[in-house]
Image (tube, rainbow, N blue to C red):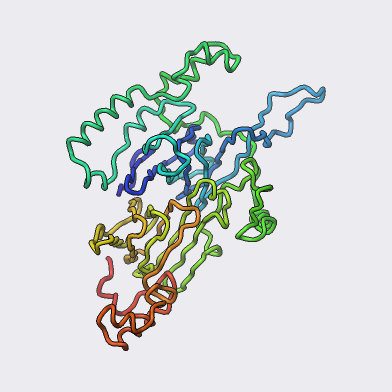
Amino acid sequence: MFESPRTHEENVRFECAGVAVIRHTIHKRGLLLPAYTNTPKLVYVEQGRGIQGAVFPGCPETFQSSGQFSRDGSQSSEDQHQKVPQVREGEVVALPSGVADWFYNNGDSPLVLVQLLDTSNPANQLDQDFRNFFLAGNPQRELQSQRSSYQRDQFEGQRGRQDEDESRRHQQDRNRNVFGGFDEQILAEAFNINTRLARSMRNEKDNRGIIVRAEHELQVVSPHQSREEEEREIEYRGGPGGRFNGIEETFCTARLKHNINDPERADFFNPLAGRLTTVNSLNLPILRSVQLSVERGVLYPNAMMSPHWNMNAHSIIYITRGNGRIQIVGDNGQTIFDGEVREGQVVTAPQSFAVVKKAGSQGFEWVSFKTNDNAQVSQLAGRVSTIRGLPVEVVANSFQISREDARRLKNNREEVSVFSPSQSGRSGEIA
């Protein structure tokens, strides 16, 4: 797990799940410099609003200023670029590997982004480390803030970690943006610019890091989409599930984001317990390409999510608000995690490991990044649970209990996915 960061960026790697989590805090007029990674990624907007750009190779620059051409037909100095959508709190942005992207905070409050990078994804043909290839800036300082997850602390020797950290520090001393590795004459020729400008691209004396403050408010072409337009877009695409036919949904025109905070989009809702919302390849088709999905959970005070396991994915749980308790149980029945968690921490639940979440007195909210574009969950309790699907005789004989107790075990919880506080659980409330 990691605490809420005090710096611009916080990195954590979960080797058992083959993923990494990065948290960026971008202040007003802050620009997260363009970069691409060797992995697909999901970006959750935890707080704030801004704009986001992604550059897909070969796609046209369809956003352009109204004065793009002068009256005599010659090209003016106005800009044109690939689409730049607005992003706001609660939205999830999906990005394939190798696609350069950037974020900018055009609001008044901090823009907080939580990124999940799937290093074990088939699209990553390198090693299991995530690699940010920055196109500008000097990433040296931020890369030095990387640290290992608590799983590595448990399973690797201290001396081995120190040797690896020392090796990484030597490597980080030489870290620059991608252009920093090219000869300035080559850059000048490639971009048809002078060597002074080519030298500036290398950013060798730039100590601002990877999040920089824009000198003036960033001016880009970015239309605002109203709620009515969003609803028309959903209707055009065939409803919330969409109709993915491989024609409209190309990389150049693909819808990259989906708001997961909207209560109206919840998949499960219990007025006494909370709600669950899922974004997968059925309602955001580009997730088929990145092979990831995400779940948003909101539990009211002392409510609980049904004990369950993830059938076909690891789950990386990032706590966005409140406090609660998470327990994770392995294949031998051993509790591998049992602890209270709070806002800003991360816990990994490996595939098939049983998980339960219980809210504390403040309520409990989280986002779970999952390493499958259509992650499936099997519940252990409740109306649609595995136990509910077993015959009473099987339950009775399996647990060596009476048939009456077996019926209670099967039928006493009629809720689905999110459970209201029960009288029997009041003694275990979390302060």
Residue 425: give x, y in percent of width and height.
Answer: 29, 75
Q: Residue at 25%, 32% (x, y): give it.
A: 164
Q: Is residue 103 above or below residue 412?
A: above
Between 150 and 375, the one lying in front of the other is 375
Count of numbered marks: 0
For this orientation, the residue located farthest to the right is 72
Can residue 380 be seen in this snapshot? yes
Q: Is residue 382 above or below residue 174?
A: below
Tell me which corner region of the image, top left, top right, bottom left or bottom right, holds residue 273. Answer: bottom left
Q: Residue at 73%, 29% (x, y): give it.
A: 68
Q: Is residue 105 above or below residue 406?
A: above
Residue 282: give x, y in percent of width and height.
Answer: 57, 57
Q: Is residue 83 left or right of residue 96?
A: right
Residue 376: give x, y in percent of width and height.
Answer: 45, 61
Q: Residue at 51%, 46% (x, y): give it.
A: 290
Q: Is residue 338 left or right of residue 245?
A: left
Q: Is residue 320 left or right of residue 233?
A: left
Can residue 110 be seen in this snapshot? no
For this orientation, the residue located farthest to the bottom is 404
Residue 353: give x, y in percent of width and height.
Answer: 33, 60
